[in-house]
Image (tube, grey):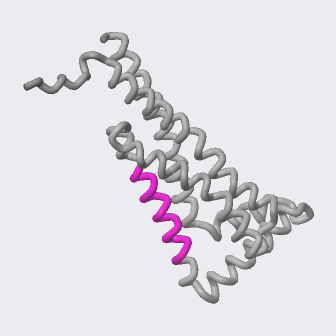
Amino acid sequence: MVQTKFRETKLRRRIKRCLWTVIIGLAVSGVTAFPLETELKFLSDHVSSSSMMGTWLHATYRAVKTTNQQFPTLSYGTDWLAFAHLVLAVLFVGPLRDPVKNIWVIQFGMIACVGVFPLAFIAGSIRGIPFFWQLIDCSFGAIGIIPLYFSYEYVLQTESNKKSDPQNARPLPQQL
């Protein structure tokens, strides 16, 4: 029993560490979507335009700057993108509090990470996004699924430990 409790505490600590990684990643992604033009200007100023990435960054910065000057309401879309990331970060508070009950949130996160790939490749190709940038976009899904997968496995182990612990066993129904 003591060993089971110790193991569950250890697993819950691991789950929390993985989920905090996801929450912080989503929050940082969300917060950094607000000052898009400023960030692109910084990158444009510090990356050589002689490289393929530099050329693309310079063109993207000019497009965002021109769009913001002429049609500032379009940036409202990236504000909502930022907000969505922050809301998704809050969603993972549920599994932090009760990972077994809220395992569906972790599953949802893993599905979303897998969904990044077709979106990046399909929409990226349609919009003329360079392949190297599509791979960078895919990295969010590839990296994000790692702590989610480990969280998922740790939750399954926690659930399995609870079921195998005689202290948590349900009483047998009474026979008539």
Question: Where residue 164 sits: x, y (%)?
Answer: 35, 20
Q: Which residue occupies the extreme left position in the image?
A: 176
Up the image or down, 99 lies above or below 34; here it is above
- From the viewer's side, name the closer residue of 80 and 114: 114
Horizontal side of 66 relative to 78 (left or right) equals: right
- From the viewer's side, name the closer residue of 29 and 141: 141
Q: Which residues are magenta?
A: 76-91
Magenta stretch: dominant secondary structure = helix
- From the viewer's side, name the closer residue of 14 and 114: 114
Q: Quadrant of residue 49?
A: bottom right
Count of picture labels: 0
Question: Where residue 85 sits: x, y (%)?
Answer: 49, 59
Q: Which residue occupies the extreme right position in the image?
A: 50
x 38%, y 42%: residue: 95
x 48%, y 37%: residue: 152
Up the image or down, 174 lies above or below 55; here it is above
x 64%, y 52%: residue: 140
Q: Quadrant of the N terminus?
A: top left
Q: Quadrant of residue 173?
A: top left
x 47%, y 40%: residue: 19
Up the image or down, 62 lies above or below 81; here it is below
Q: Quadrant of residue 64?
A: bottom right
- From the viewer's side, name the closer residue of 172 and 31: 172
Question: Where residue 167 sits: x, y (%)?
Answer: 24, 17
Q: Quadrant of the C terminus?
A: top left
Up the image or down, 39 lies above or below 28; here it is below
Check if residue 79 falls in the magenta segment.
yes
Question: Where residue 132 sits: x, y (%)?
Answer: 81, 58
Horizontal side of 145 relative to 164 (left or right) equals: right
